[in-house]
Image (tube, grey):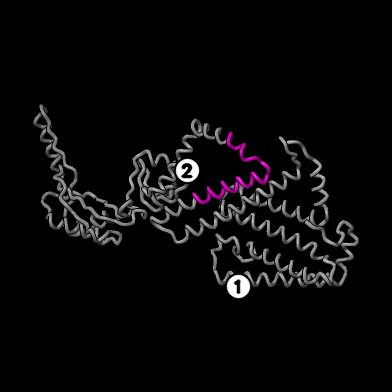
């Protein structure tokens, strides 16, 4: 980085440069560049109308994205070039480093927000990144940065056949961070593009492509970052062998979960939005991660299920090939009831519910001759099991009860016959009179 012609290490000369009339011209050009950048970003935001939650370029308000400080920086560079022949660059020596730091902060923060949304460590990392960027800008403005870098370059040691200094490590770490942020940015953009307006079967396939793309880009970015730091990649062959042994022994379950996740997404045996039942837990597949699957019940509870369990155990997918689900309810009536009337009333109670499908239509059948009465089974189909099943069954049962009472159909109470052997006649008569009463 080239130092400014103004000797910033001389505070008095720096203040005198700010007191010159040319500094007002620099401030005016800087303000004009900021206004032009704001107008350009506002126009582009209205034209493209990006998603505020996922936008890295624009942010929520246009000025908190990457595009605004980046355009301001470009216009500021152009303004400094145009005014170089008239003013001594007093304001530019402060504005340019500050804008570069602002761009670096916005890029890092926005990319991390999109790539790792709601992560608990995100805010501390963002604050640390902001502090480091502003400290570097202050060191650049005051002229301390070249001095500090020269001192760090004096601290060095031998590492194998090469000499490594603290400055080299810092520059390598900075290069690695830039490479990883760019990899995360590209993978997040590809993921947002793939998952946009995706639903049903295409959502699972796009999820596979998104996960694979992110893993590939991060792997390539990690290798480039290690090369930037100065680590020989051929030494990773030994590390790869050790990782393989670790996976074979201690990490086999973790590896099995990751492989199972890609198998589920590739085979599409379970898709996002499917209604599934695993053991006694039933719910909708909310998300399929590389290691686990999130199943959300209609009650709001969420179950995190390892992907290996979904591959090796029996899972009922209620909407794999057909989203329709069959439900039933059993009703008992007296033996002297009109069978045809009862069937019509049961089917009417089901058809009065808008969630019950008309094709196939509800069907009421005499399913059994019970000990207390005739047992009818009412079966019906629904297409939205994710909206709950107990409430619909309750509504149908309540309507059945109202219709049966309205038409005088008796719902019998349980009846039992009691035989008393060897009891006195008086006791038997008393028990018979009590039962008759």
Q: Residue at x 72, y 46 (%)?
A: 170
Q: Position of residue 201 (x, y in %)?
A: 38, 55
Residue 29's place in the image compared with 179, above or below, is below
Membership of 226 in magenta stretch: yes
Question: Which residue lies under the disc numbered 2?
Answer: 291
Residue 314 image point, x, y percent: 34, 40
**Residue tagged by mark 1?**
43
Magenta region: which residues?
212-238
Q: Residue furthest left?
A: 425
Q: Main secondary structure of the magenta part?
A: helix
Quadrant hosting residue 263:
top left
Left or right: residue 375 versus residue 273 is: left
Q: Do the residues bearing badges 2 and 1 touch, measured as CB atoms within 8 Å?
A: no
Query: Which residue occupies the foreground of this view, 172 or 334?
Result: 172
Q: Residue at horizontal 42%, vertical 55%? A: 203
Element at label 2: loop
- Gap between marks 2 and 1 measured at Cα: 42 Å
Q: Is residue 207 above or below residue 291?
A: below
- Relative placement, left or right, of 329 versus 216 is left
- Residue at 68% x, 49% y is 175
Quadrant of image for the N terminus: bottom right
Q: Of helix, strand and loop, which one carries label 1?
A: helix
Q: Residue 323 falls in which quadrant of the image?
A: bottom left
């Amino acid at each position: 980085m080239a130092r400014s012609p103004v000797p910033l290490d001389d505070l008095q000369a720096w203040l005198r440069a700010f007191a010159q009339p040319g500094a007002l011209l620099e401030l005016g050009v800087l303000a004009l560049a900021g206004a032009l950048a704001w107008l350009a970003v506002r126009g582009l935001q209205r034209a493209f109308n990006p998603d505020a939650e996922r936008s890295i370029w624009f942010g929520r308000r246009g000025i908190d994205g990457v595009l605004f400080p980046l355009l301001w920086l470009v216009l500021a560079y152009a303004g400094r070039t145009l005014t170089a022949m008239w003013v001594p660059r007093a304001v530019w020596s402060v504005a340019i480093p500050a804008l570069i730091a602002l761009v670096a902060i916005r890029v890092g923060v926005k990319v991390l927000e999109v790539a790792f949304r709601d992560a608990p460590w995100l805010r501390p990392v963002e604050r640390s990144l902001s502090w480091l960027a502003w400290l570097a800008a202050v060191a650049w403005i005051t002229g301390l940065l070249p001095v500090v870098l020269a001192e760090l370059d004096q601290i060095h040691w031998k590492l194998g056949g090469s000499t490594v200094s603290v400055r080299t490590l810092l520059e390598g770490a900075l290069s690695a961070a830039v490479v990883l942020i760019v990899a995360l940015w590209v993978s997040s953009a590809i993921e947002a593009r793939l998952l946009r307006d995706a639903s049903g079967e295409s959502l699972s396939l796009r999820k596979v492509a998104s996960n694979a793309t992110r893993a590939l880009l991060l792997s390539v970015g990690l290798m480039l970052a290690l090369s930037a730091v100065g680590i020989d990649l051929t030494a990773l062959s030994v590390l790869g062998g050790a990782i393989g042994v670790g996976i074979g022994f201690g990490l086999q379950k973790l590896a099995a979960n990751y492989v199972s996740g890609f198998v589920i997404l590739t085979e599409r045996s379970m898709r996002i939005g499917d209604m599934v039942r695993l053991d006694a837990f039933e719910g909708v597949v909310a998300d399929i991660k590389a290691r686990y699957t999130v199943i959300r019940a209609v009650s709001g509870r969420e179950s995190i299920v390892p992907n290996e369990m979904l591959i090796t155990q029996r899972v009922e997918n209620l909407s794999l090939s057909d989203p329709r689900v069959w439900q039933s309810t059993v009703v008992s009536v007296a033996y002297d009831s009109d069978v045809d009337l009862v069937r019509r009333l049961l089917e009417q109670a089901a058809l009065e519910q808008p969630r019950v499908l008309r094709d196939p239509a509800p069907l009421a059948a005499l399913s059994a001759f019970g000990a207390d009465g005739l047992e009818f089974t009412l079966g019906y189909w629904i297409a939205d099991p994710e909206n709950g099943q107990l409430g619909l069954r309750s509504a149908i049962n309540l309507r059945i009860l109202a219709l049966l009472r309205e038409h005088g159909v008796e719902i019998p109470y349980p009846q039992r016959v009691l035989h008393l052997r060897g009891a006195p006649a008086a006791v038997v008569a008393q028990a018979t009179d009590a039962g008759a009463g």
